[in-house]
Image: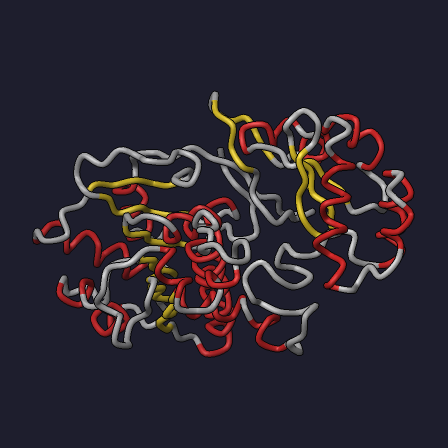
Amino acid sequence: MPSNGPLTGLRVVEFQGIGPGPHVAMMLADMGAEVVRIERSGHQPMNPVVERARHRVAVDLKSEDGQAFVKTALKHADVLIEGFRPGVMERLGLGPDDLLSANPALIYARMTGWGQDGPLAQAAGHDLNYIAITGALDAIGKRGELPVPPQNLVGDFGGGSMYCAMGILAALFERTSSGKGQVVDAAIVDGVTSLMSFFYGQPHSALRTVDRGAGLLGGAAHFYRCYTCKDGKEISVGAIEPQFYAELLQRADAPDHLREAQMDPSKWGSYAEDLANLFATKTQDEWRELLEGTDACFAPVVPLDHAKDHPHMKARGAFVEHGGRWHTAPAPRFDRTPATIRDSVQDGDAVVARWSEGG
């Protein structure tokens, strides 16, 4: 399926990787970019959702033919995405100095955990390790218990792929005036540190703290946490503002004493027990009937496999059935140049040949 997304005409070369790198390429491809994916021979897609919309080609990067193919592709590409350890691309003769001399307009995006330099740059690691040194992991979990790994959302994707994509787009914009490409050093530790800017900048207090399991946003407040319902299903409440908190209590028919001292942390523990007892008296569906769609700041906790069935997600088209499989819809949305979901095709060599011919 052809695309007329906002990045239509952008040429991207992605080197096969895991985690944030493929997610960056997916987002660019969803927006219309033509992404040639350099893969190892025999590779089969591990994740057909994240690896969609690619022009795949198997290449031996250590062979003369493979080197020639990749360098031809990158001579005509706008963007390169790679996620190897620092130095690997240089040893292959595909480092920034080599490629930018052949194509000075190339945006060379390097997606790693620790970054291109620093004492940990050559160490192995994963999302959990990267967020551990930023202060983010220390803040997530219950008081007195170990930190809770937040899947790999915070590091790989929040501080990784999103910042890498932002860096690529910023470099492309700068290129419109300079005509020059540059290296984008997208390190997860840098991105997650940036994500934590709100917490670094706010005054430290009992209300606003990153102490684990404490503070208004850390799970201590009775009005900003999750509860279990009569049927074992769960709900979330986030009624921070006084008017929303009042509406929550009124609609839920909560005990009168909860209306006093909402922002007193010394009351939060006992108030949370009161709300836990209250929410355990009805099923999730019954609470949804009472609270969903109001200003009580309420939502059911929906398992991943059922998210596509929630009425709001259905109405938004947040999930799209394509090729017999459910996909996450491209985001964000554009009114004139909508993004599209496309299949991956094993035609990367033909695409590079077309690029070489000026097509």
The structure residue drawn at horizontal position 65% and vertical position 56%, both measured from the top left corner, is 220
Q: Quadrant of the rendered structure where residue 251 is?
A: top right
Q: Residue furthest top?
A: 324
Q: In this rendering, is residue 205 above or below 160? A: below
Q: Position of residue 37 (x, y in %)?
A: 31, 46
Tell me which colouring the rendered structure shows.
secondary structure
Q: Nearer the viewer, residue 358 or 349?
A: 349
Q: Position of residue 165 (x, y in %)?
A: 47, 59
Q: Nearer the viewer, residue 160 or 265?
A: 265
Q: Is residue 99 left or right of residue 317?
A: left
Q: In this rendering, is residue 124 above or below 56? A: below
Q: In this rendering, is residue 242 above or below 2? A: below
Q: Is residue 174 left or right of residue 267?
A: left
Q: Position of residue 227 (x, y in %)?
A: 68, 40
Q: Position of residue 317 (x, y in %)?
A: 65, 34
Q: Nearer the viewer, residue 213 or 335?
A: 213
Q: Quadrant of the rendered structure where residue 304 is?
A: top right
The structure residue drawn at horizontal position 79% and vertical position 32%, both measured from the top left corner, is 287
Q: Is residue 80 left or right of residue 205?
A: left
The structure residue drawn at horizontal position 72% and vertical position 48%, both measured from the top left corner, is 272
The structure residue drawn at horizontal position 47% and vertical position 68%, both measured from the top left corner, is 135
